Image (tube, grey):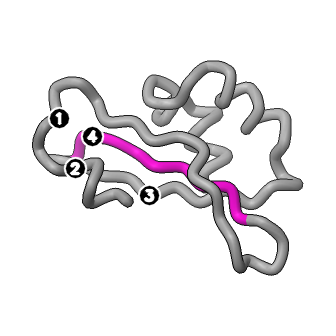
Amino acid sequence: TLSSMIQSGEYAELIQPSLLSTLKRRFPQTLWVAVEARIDGELAGIALAEVFPLGQVAKIASYMIKEKFKEQGIGRQLL
């Protein structure tokens, strides 16, 4: 789950520290969706979105690509 991935630290390096603390504080009341990109098994980037009630609207909260994977179109594919 996203919650366990954040707590284990896999996403922590790609999420802004202030957002990370907000995510940890708001679970489980808020539904979050993560879309990740991996290259050869390594996490290359993620996009996190908050899903609002009724699931009809989502807002992107964080979008990060590791430096070594930038300029390869990964971010465009995530969104």
Q: Which residue is mark 1?
A: 69
Separation of disc 2 and disc 3 at Cα?
11 Å
Marks 4,1: beta carbons within 8 A: yes
What amino acid type is highlighted by mark number 1?
Phe
Label annotation for residue 35: 3
Marks 2,1: beta carbons within 8 A: yes
Separation of disc 4 and disc 1 at Cα?
6 Å
Q: Is residue 4 left or right of residue 48?
A: right
The residue sitting at 31% across, 36% down in the picture is 65
Question: Relative to 40, does residue 67 appear above or below in the rendering?
Answer: above
Q: Which residue is mark 4?
A: 44
Q: Quadrant of the N terminus?
A: bottom right
Instruction: Say whether residue 48 is magenta.
Output: yes
Q: Is residue 19 left or right of residue 65?
A: right
Image quadrant in which you'd find residue 23: top right
Separation of disc 4 and disc 3 at Cα?
11 Å
